[in-house]
């Protein structure tokens, strides 16, 4: 699908834009997940560019053989921007020799759960009520999330970059299935 979207690595001069983007889209430039507080603007990543304008971003950290996506936001949903960003970070993880890409999302984020599973991620862990601890670190996390769902749990998703049996046999590069 031709989207007119390009990606490029985040540069030092993007930092102010990244902080503003996080504040506009997430109400804060900090993220609390898996019991830690971190600042995605400090992480490497990629910017999605549409007609010369930065519209979305993905950030990540590399630890040992794993790449953690610390933030992904397409800015404008459902145009293919998220797919392009996932492809960029997965390529970077492979080039860095990572065996897996992983991330944490929340129980209310049904669009993201759909999106990740359609792109080769699988649910690997559930941390019930983990948002209570996250709120202690970041009190601005709302009580109610998307679709009016109480924001409560952390869900861990992972994509193997080495296990050829990771994906179901019907899973194709274009994300289609015979179902
Ligand atoms: C989750 C997210 C990154 C996905 O990015 P995106 O740019 O929307 O993704 P794409 O456009 O590449 O793909 C979206 C999919 O939703 C489908 N879609 C289209 N319209 C839709 C709608 N109204 N509702 C739900 N899905 C829709 C698309 O067809 C596509 O389907 P596919 O999986 O069958 O290909 C993006 O929605 C986002 O930034 N959300 C807000 C931030 C967020 O929650 N980040 C994740 C935190 S863990």
Image (cartoon, rainbow, N blue to C red):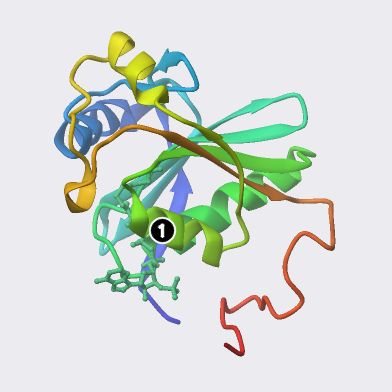
Residue 150: x and y in percent read: 24, 38
Residue at image point 33% right, 32% down = 152
Count how many numbered circles sit on residues in the image. Answer: 1
Residue 17: x and y in percent read: 24, 33
Image position of 44 with respect to 162: above or below: above
Q: Residues within 10 Å of mark 1 (few under 14, many from 20)?
A: many
Q: Disc 1 on helix, strand or loop?
A: helix
Image position of 99 with respect to 41: above or below: below
Q: Of 119 and 127, which appears nearest the observer?
A: 127
Image position of 101 with respect to 5: above or below: above
Question: Which residue is most to the front?
Answer: 128
Residue at image point 58% right, 34% down = 68
Dividing the image into four quarters, tell me where ligand 1 lies: bottom left
Q: Is residue 65 visible?
A: yes
Q: Of 5 and 109, which appears nearest the observer?
A: 109
Residue at image point 84% right, 61% down = 164
Question: Which residue is most to the top?
Answer: 136
Q: Is residue 101 left or right of residue 77?
A: right
Q: Of 11 and 3, which appears nearest the observer?
A: 3
Residue 118: x and y in percent read: 53, 67
Q: Quadrant of the N terminus?
A: bottom left
Q: Quadrant of the C terminus?
A: bottom right
When asked about the image quadrant of residue 16, the answer is top left
Q: Is residue 41 visible?
A: no
Q: Of 162 and 13, which appears nearest the observer?
A: 162
When asked about the image quadrant of residue 25, the answer is top left
Q: Is residue 130 left or right of residue 78?
A: right
Residue beneath disc 1: 82
Q: Does the residue tagged 1 have its C-beta within 8 Å of any atom of ligand 1?
A: yes
Question: Which residue is most to the bottom?
Answer: 178
């Amino acid at each position: 699908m031709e989207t007119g979207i390009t990606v490029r690595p985040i540069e030092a001069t993007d930092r102010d834009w990244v902080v503003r983007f996080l504040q506009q889209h997430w109400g804060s430039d900090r993220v609390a997940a898996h019991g830690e507080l971190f600042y995605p603007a400090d992480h490497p990543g990629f910017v999605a560019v549409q007609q010369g304008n930065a519209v979305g971003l993905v950030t990540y950290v590399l630890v040992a053989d794993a790449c953690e996506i610390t933030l992904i936001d397409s800015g404008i949903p459902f145009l293919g921007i998220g797919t392009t960003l996932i492809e960029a970070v997965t390529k970077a993880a492979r080039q860095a020799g990572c065996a897996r890409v992983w991330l944490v999302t929340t129980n209310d984020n049904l669009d993201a759960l759909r999106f990740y599973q359609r792109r080769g991620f699988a649910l690997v862990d559930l941390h019930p009520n983990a948002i209570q601890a996250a709120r202690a670190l970041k009190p601005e996390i709302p009580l109610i999330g998307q679709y009016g769902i109480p924001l409560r749990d952390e869900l861990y998703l992972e994509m193997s970059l080495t296990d050829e049996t990771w994906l179901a046999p019907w899973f194709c590069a274009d994300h289609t299935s015979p179902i």
